[in-house]
Amino acid sequence: MCAPHESRSFAELPDATRATRLLDDLATAPCAFAPVAADRSLALYGAGSLGRLAREFLTGVGRDFAVIIDRNAEALAREPYWIGTRLLRPDAVTAVEKHGLRFAVSIVTSPYVPIEQSLREYGFDEVVPFYDLAESFRAVHPLSNGWFAPPFSTRDCDNTTEVLALWHDDCSRAHHLQFLAWRRLRQEWRFDAAPVSIDDRFFIPEVAGLLGTDEFMLDAGAHHGEVIEGFLARTSGGFRRIIAIEPDPENRAVLQERLGASLADDPRVSVHDAALAADARSALFHAGLGYASQLAPTGRLQATTQPLDALDLAPSFLKLHLEGGELAALKGARDTLRRGRPIIAATVYHNADGIWKTPLWLMRTLPDYRFLFRLHGWCGTGAVVYAIPQERIARA
């Protein structure tokens, strides 16, 4: 039986001094967990959006699974996507399967530890986070949401301490520490006064309250246009310009169809086939992975990367979700950022750049900005750094 994960709760938010002490607690402590080997028959727990990705991931790496467990199994069994798949409620799993299968939890919209505890109470022996299982397939699939941070060096500690001090609020420090605790130790830290917010990714109140009807939105890593739809909802459909950047051909086709349905022939909207990076070069792109498509050595599609500076654009709201390529894209946008001073929302949970490199680069590059860190998922996922120019706040 695998070891259970630990949780830790805090009643108060940490100021910079307290955050540094908590960082010391986790910086070099031994981690009891590691990527989960694919050495046992598998089952999935959770049939939501991550459950679908997990199913497609396992198919892509040549692995099968015996069953999907979900509390709404009866209703899900009627959905076309799941027809032909064995779906069961937790209480319908046989004793043989409870002891013989490894159950990968494919849910990040709720805390992990209570789910694990509940499954153990049902008698499930092997319960692991799905992303920890996926980490064992990185040689053939680039999905990178399950990475483990090694013990922090002195440089890591010094730079992370600087970042913790420069966040605008204690909620950011709490969420950053919660993110670090999972990545370093697989501990689930919870701050009562800083709940994880699932539904407002990229549009936290501090950002949404500033968006007007004359914004130029640049959506890098646009996938199927979900964030663009969220932007339109929050600006009552008003905008000056929208550019969607999506290098995956399948995603881009869906995106264009979806935008065409709501913004047909609108000259203010365009979709670009570009892979943003720090410079222009030839690189492999792993396409066909949905929102996990990315620049990666496992890819077969030859792409030419572009720095955002070369596109000569002036967005007022920049969203970056590039599966780990955010820091490189930001470096390739230095002049654009300094000249146009957009609101920035960048994901930072796909690799160790999110520990301190990406936020510190922003903090040292952009003067007179307010920097926030928010978690929009559990298991170390959904982490977004927000950079808001002070003049936008002053005008509001």
Image: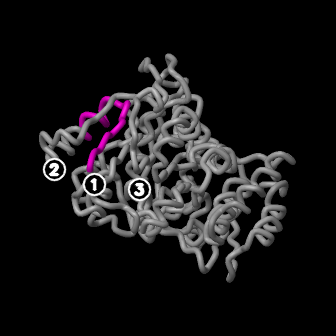
- Left or right, residue 71 beside residue 37: left
CA–CA distance in space, label 2 to label 3: 35 Å
Specify the color scheme: one colour
On the image, numbered disc 3 is attached to which residue?
68
State left or right for residue 16 relative to residue 374. right
Q: Nearer the viewer, mark 1 or mark 3?
A: 1
Q: Nearer the viewer, mark 2 or mark 3?
A: 2
Crowd rating for badge 2 (residues with CA inside 10 Å; few <14, some 14–19, many 20+) = few
**Residue at which label 1 appears:** 229
Residue type at mark 1 is: Glu
Q: Are discs 2 and 3 less than 8 Å apart at CB?
A: no
Quadrant of residue 301 within the rendered picture: top left
Earlier-in-chain disc, 2 versus 1:
1
Residue 124 in the image: x percent, y percent? 57, 64
Q: In the picture shown, does residue 273 fall above or below 349?
A: above
Range of the magenta residues? 240-255
Real-space Cα separation, disc 1 to disc 3, in angstroms? 31 Å
Answer with left or right where residue 109 lies relative to residue 370: left
Under circle 1, the secondary element is helix
